[in-house]
Amino acid sequence: MLRSQNKQMARKTVGSMADYALAMLRIVAAFTFCCHGAQKLFGAFGGMGGHGAKAHAFSLFWIAGVLEFFGGLLIGVGLGTRVVAFILCGEMAVAYFRTHLPAGFFPLQNGGELAVLYCFIYLYLVFAGPGAFSLDGLRGRR
């Protein structure tokens, strides 16, 4: 009986941490995604191609940079998480099929691992929501 109680207690502890783990996934993915946007929009982190180059205004790279930077900020603070995650999931799917897939089927072969991972992280956030530490959660409590 004691063993059964210990297992139940362990499940409750792990389950109670899931919301925080989800928040960590959301925040870290948003931060790195935002960095990709800053690279395209502002030439940060060496810019595009490592030479400080920025995307030209209203080009596909610029639009991607806007989505990545501002979408990353919104996901990071957890504001409009499900809607923004849906848009970013779509962006990453388009990036994969338009840019990476023509170079080969497998993500490791075509350099599309990040696009696939971001796509599925954001798809998960569409259904799971923002987790702990989000503005969406604060708005929902009122």
Image: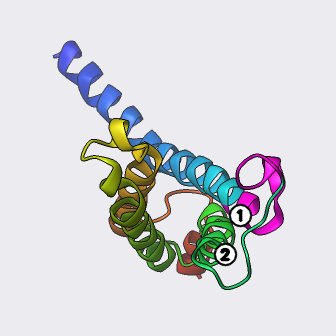
Which contiguous range is marked in magenta? 37-51
Residue 123, by quadrant, is bottom left
- The structure residue drawn at horizontal position 35% and vertical position 59%, both measured from the top left corner, is 124
Is 111 placed left or right of 105 in the picture? right
Task: Give the residue at mark 1.
Answer: 40
Mark 2 surroundings within 10 Å by alpha-carbon count, few (fewer than 14), some (14 through 19), many (20 or more): some
In terms of secondary structure, where does tag 1 sit? helix
Quarter of the C terminus within the rendering:
bottom right
- The three-letter amino acid code for the residue at tag 2 is Trp
In the displayed structure, 17 sits above or below 100; it is above
Mark 1 surroundings within 10 Å by alpha-carbon count, few (fewer than 14), some (14 through 19), many (20 or more): many
Across and down, in percent, residue 108 comes to: 36, 36
Q: Based on the picture, tell me whether residue 47 belongs to the magenta stretch.
A: yes
Please tell me which residue lies in front, 33 or 22: 33
Is 66 placed left or right of 18 in the picture? right
In the displayed structure, 84 sits above or below 37; it is below
Mark positioned earlier in the residue sequence (2 or 1):
1
Please tell me which residue lies in front, 22 or 44: 44
Q: Are marks 2 and 1 in contact (CB under 8 Å)?
A: yes
